[in-house]
């Protein structure tokens, strides 16, 4: 997919469900989610067990490792790419996307930050955001100040997870990228900002660090939260005796 806004191109993969998709789920960091987290196997298992409602799963790669440093830390042209280029293409190629009930964006680490930011620049586009160990420390927690002042605020619900071992601070990632506070502290600061504005974020701490194995363990529950099975909801209501013939 060529992008005018980003002046580059990237690969996009789409996984179609067996039955008609009623949702759209966009994964950033496609290669990391597919090859390191094992997202496609996780989705296959959730589908097979009926744990999630059918969704188009759209895996969006980064153009390069170098461009990832540019595009992820709250970069407006990247948000425009998602809204003005990716979604029009997707809805043209897969008309069911036009009627999606849940529109979810998913990211980890730097793309966990990007996912949250994209939801803020397009406040009606996404219904849910999954941010796994999101790098909300970026640029001295700029996104938190941005969110506090934003009007209108995104309509999305937020899932945030972070590891109890993600406690390192004053980390120099590259010459011009210094992480002054820890991952877990920054995620908590973003969670608290959401709470101050009436959101009810689904916040999860896991016993692990900033790594793919940990995210592969939390992703199934994150997807169950984002794409709850209609069948399971109906069975739960029936089981509680809330529906009567």
Image: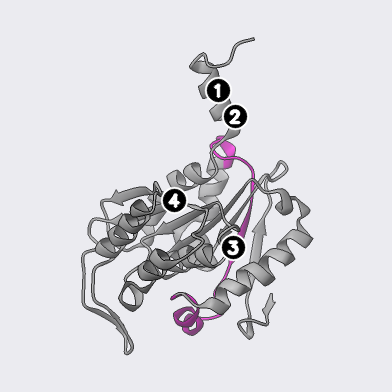
How much space separates mark 2 and mark 1, taking CA atoms? 6 Å
Residue at 34 percent of width and 58 percent of height: 193
Residue at 24 percent of width and 76 percent of height: 180
Q: Which mark is residue 59?
A: 3
How much space separates mark 4 and mark 1, taking CA atoms? 24 Å
Residue position marked by numbered label 4 in the rendering:
219
Residue position marked by numbered label 1 in the rendering:
235
How much space separates mark 2 and mark 4, taking CA atoms? 21 Å
Q: Earlier in the sequence, mark 1 or mark 3?
A: 3
Relative height, residue 87 to residue 140 (above, below): above
Circles 2 and 1, Cβ within 8 Å, touching? The answer is yes
Few, some or many C-alpha atoms within 10 Å of disc 2 (few <14, some 14-19, many ≥20)? few
Residue at 49 percent of width and 42 percent of height: 224
Figure quadrant of residue 94: bottom right
Residue 135 can be seen, yes or no: no
Relative height, residue 42 to residue 35 (above, below): above
Q: Earlier in the sequence, mark 2 or mark 3?
A: 3
Q: Which of marks 2 and 4 is nearer the N terminus?
A: 4
How much space separates mark 2 and mark 3, taking CA atoms? 26 Å
Residue position marked by numbered label 2 in the rendering:
231
Residue 207 can be seen, yes or no: yes
Q: What secondary structure is marked by label 1?
A: helix
Q: What secondary structure is marked by label 2?
A: helix
How much space separates mark 1 and mark 3, taking CA atoms? 31 Å
User: What span is colored magenta in the figure?
Assistant: 47-73
Few, some or many C-alpha atoms within 10 Å of disc 3 (few <14, some 14-19, many ≥20)? many
Quarter of the image with the N terminus is bottom right
* Front-most of residues 121 and 176: 121
**Residue at far bottom of view:** 175
**Image location (x, y in percent) of residue 241:** 51, 13
Relative height, residue 24 to residue 51 (above, below): below
Q: Is residue 244 magenta?
A: no
């Amino acid at each position: 997919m060529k992008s005018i806004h980003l002046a580059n191109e990237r690969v996009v993969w789409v996984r179609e469900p067996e039955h008609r998709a009623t949702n759209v789920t966009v994964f950033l960091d496609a290669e990391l989610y597919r090859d390191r987290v094992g997202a496609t196997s996780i989705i296959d298992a959730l589908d097979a067990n009926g744990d999630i409602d059918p969704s188009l799963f759209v895996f969006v790669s980064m153009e390069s490792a170098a461009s990832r440093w540019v595009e992820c830390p709250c970069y407006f042209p990247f948000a425009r790419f998602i809204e003005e280029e990716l979604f029009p293409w997707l809805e043209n190629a897969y008309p069911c996307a036009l009627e999606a009930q849940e529109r979810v964006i998913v990211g980890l680490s730097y793309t966990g930050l990007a996912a949250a930011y994209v939801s803020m620049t397009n406040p009606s586009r996404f219904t849910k955001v999954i941010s796994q160990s999101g790098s909300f420390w970026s640029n001295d927690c700029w996104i938190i100040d941005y969110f506090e002042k934003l009007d209108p605020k995104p309509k999305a619900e937020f899932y945030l997870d972070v590891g109890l071992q993600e406690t390192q601070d004053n980390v120099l990632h590259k010459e011009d990228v210094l992480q002054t506070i820890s991952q877990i502290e920054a995620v908590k600061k973003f969670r608290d900002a959401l709470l101050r504005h009436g959101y009810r974020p689904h916040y999860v701490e896991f016993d692990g660090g900033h790594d793919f194995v940990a995210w592969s363990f939390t992703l199934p529950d994150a997807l169950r939260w984002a794409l709850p099975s209609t069948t399971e909801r109906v069975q739960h209501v029936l089981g509680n005796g809330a529906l009567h013939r």
